[in-house]
Image (cartoon, rainbow, N blue to C red):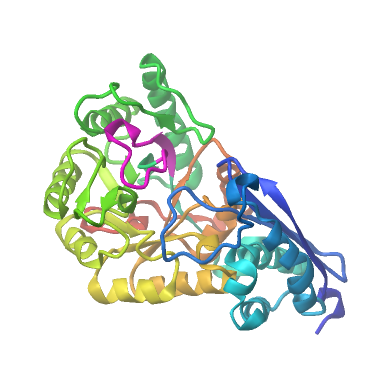
Amino acid sequence: MNSKNCIKKVHAIQVYTRRHVLGIKAFVETEGGAKGQAECSAGVSIGSHEVHFEYDGGTRWGGKGCTKAVNSINTVINDTLRGMDVTNQYELDRAMLQIGGDGKNAVGGNAIAAVSAACLKAGAAALEIPLYRYIGGERACMLPVPGAPAYSGGERWGGGVHPTGNKPTTAFQCYDFGSFAEASYAGWEVYRIWEEEMFKRDIPETDAFFFKIQKGKFKDSDEGIFELMADCIRKAGYENKVGIQIDFAADTYYDRETKLYRGLLYEKPRDRDELMDYYIKIIRTYPFVSVEDPFYEDDYESHALLTSKVDIQVVGDDLYTTMRERVQKGVLLGATNAMLLKVNQVGSITEALEAARFAHESGLAVMPCESRGEDQDIADYCVGIGAESVREMAVLNKAANRFLEIEEELGGRAQFWGKKGLKGKKFQ
């Protein structure tokens, strides 16, 4: 083992995030001076099967402070990893997962996730190679189909059973292009037209560049919004090249007592069959290319039925929570044809990459999402694992810029997934 690659110190601080929740920022340094830092924070739609996060409780920070998890990093995790080879990601993650017999409960999945990602980046720095190549080797040259943000928020139809205030989220997925740069430009053009339409209607923009549509702006249902999105695509000249991607986050709208979905795209509550018929209708009417979490988080059967009835990509997020065992169940039942990947959703980099590998081997596409503090690193993750598409990230953020940098750096080796990056008969 190269002594320069031995971990010298692991430490962390509590940080603010753009989602107004507290997060963890972890730092890893080797004896040779290589450094890595990474953040972990909670998302908006959080599946009940996600890894346990360690919070402080009490009244300070609304009970969601992370100082306990930070202290665990600065003490027990630092003591556990100090002296280990930073380039041996599997052993580092295994050591953390074994702390106290069950590391995720002992120190918190958020603590492990932040340190695991920081170790990954320090490992790349130690070998002086880009993060995407550290993850995927020389084969890492595929860039994913990205999207440009459109609108978010569901309060206009009642807000659901467990309202998050920011779901569903919808984007313009830019798929039929020859390069990431071309797809990014298309996203910029469509977003510019969409932005003008939103300003005309006095609809506010969020800090993530989604527009927050309130009650009264569109009548009866979200279909008026879908029609406007389709019109913006046509105006930009990208019909059949840009489509609609949506994260329904249906679990936040599902009442387990009445078995009804309340406030999802429509004011009237719907049962499973009514919602199924409605999904099929809008998918056939509007240019949808990818739908995520259309039913509640444990309803594999309904996901499978919808997947069998439509010709587009169906993605599992809360359904899978980036956990191999849940993806495996989904594969056996034919629940979806794609998996959402959230690196901080499962706990460690090793587990996240294993879930992605298993999904690919099973014929599922992988769609990473930057919602848990990954920031521009999501671009390197995507290229490293060969992800076919990515949630948003076409424009307006650091990750979009990082994708452009990677494409430029790869030069003639760079390839864009394009139309074949989306699952479903529509794209074959």
Res 132 visible: yes
Vertical order, 51 against 220 (above or below): below
Residue 38: which quarter of the image? bottom right
Vertical order, 394 against 112 (above or below): above
Vertical order, 295 against 61 (above or below): below
Q: Quadrant of the N terminus?
A: bottom right
Residue 81: which quarter of the image? bottom right
Q: Position of residue 237 (x, y in %)?
A: 32, 29
Res 85 visible: no
Horizontally, residue 126 falls left or right of residue 363, namely: right
Q: Nearer the viewer, residue 97 or 226?
A: 97
Name, please, the residue furthest toward the front: 58
Residue at 56% x, 64% y is 384
Magenta part of the protein: which range? 147-166
Q: Position of residue 269 (x, y in %)?
A: 18, 43
Residue at 38% x, 59% y is 318
Q: Position of residue 3 (x, y in %)?
A: 86, 80
Q: Quadrant of the C terminus?
A: bottom left
Check residue 11 for magenta coloring.
Answer: no
Residue at 27% x, 52% y is 254
Horizontally, residue 234 falls left or right of residue 206, namely: left
Check residue 158 for magenta coloring.
Answer: yes
